[in-house]
Image (cartoon, grey):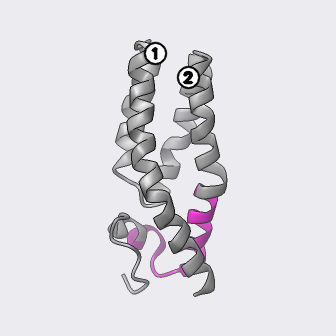
């Protein structure tokens, strides 16, 4: 990939989907940070309220955004969590899923922020 995106992201997917278009990749990263990430955080509230309909809706809506932002390996984890919600898994188990996925997401957010800013200037 000519743009030299951080290899901790799925650069193969990003190159296949967006080519070397720095503007579109910046917009995708920025949209994830400004829209998808806050929605992920609202999932915690839905779980705390044990609102499984809302949790399932949030998870379902977020699935594509992980792929689009080059976080392709997180999507299957979100799909597993969505299935667990729909199947009525124990709330403790669901909160553990959320915590594990959140830990991974939180480690990657500085990378998305840095790449988004760098690509904005490209």
Give me the residue at 42% from left, 17% from top. Answer: 92
Q: Which circle's residue, 1 or 2, is located before the other in the chain?
A: 2
- Label 2: element kind: helix
Percent x, y of residue 73: 33, 50
The residue lying at 46 percent from left, 66 percent from top is: 111
Q: Residue at x 56, y 26 (%)?
A: 55
Instruction: Find residue 2 and report its image quarter.
Output: bottom left
19 vs 102: above or below: below
Residue 57 is drawn in which quadrant? top right
Q: Which residue is mark 2?
A: 47
Dominant secondary structure, magenta: helix
Q: Magenta stretch?
A: 15-32
Read off the residue under disc 1: 91
> Mark 2 and mark 1 in contact (Cβ < 8 Å)?
yes
Q: Quadrant of the C terminus?
A: bottom right
- Split into 4 quadrants, where in the image is the N terminus? bottom left
Q: Position of residue 48 (x, y in %)?
A: 58, 21
In front here: 75 or 8? 8
Q: Tell me if mark 1 has few (under 14), some (14-19) or many (20+) residues whose alpha carbon lies within 10 angstroms of its own.
A: some
Q: Is-magenta flag for residue 23?
A: yes
Residue at image location 59% in from the left, 48% down from the top: 37
């Amino acid at each position: 990939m000519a743009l030299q995106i951080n290899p901790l992201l799925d650069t193969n997917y990003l190159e296949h989907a967006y080519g070397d278009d720095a503007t579109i990749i910046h917009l995708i990263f920025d949209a994830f940070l400004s829209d998808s990430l806050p929605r992920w955080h609202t999932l915690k509230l839905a779980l705390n309220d044990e609102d499984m309909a809302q949790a399932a809706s949030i998870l379902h809506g977020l699935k594509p955004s992980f792929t689009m932002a080059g976080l392709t390996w997180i999507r299957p984890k979100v799909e597993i969590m969505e299935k667990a919600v729909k199947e009525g898994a124990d709330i403790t188990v669901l909160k553990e899923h959320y915590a594990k996925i959140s830990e991974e997401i939180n480690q990657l957010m500085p990378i998305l922020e840095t790449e988004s800013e760098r690509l904005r200037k490209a």
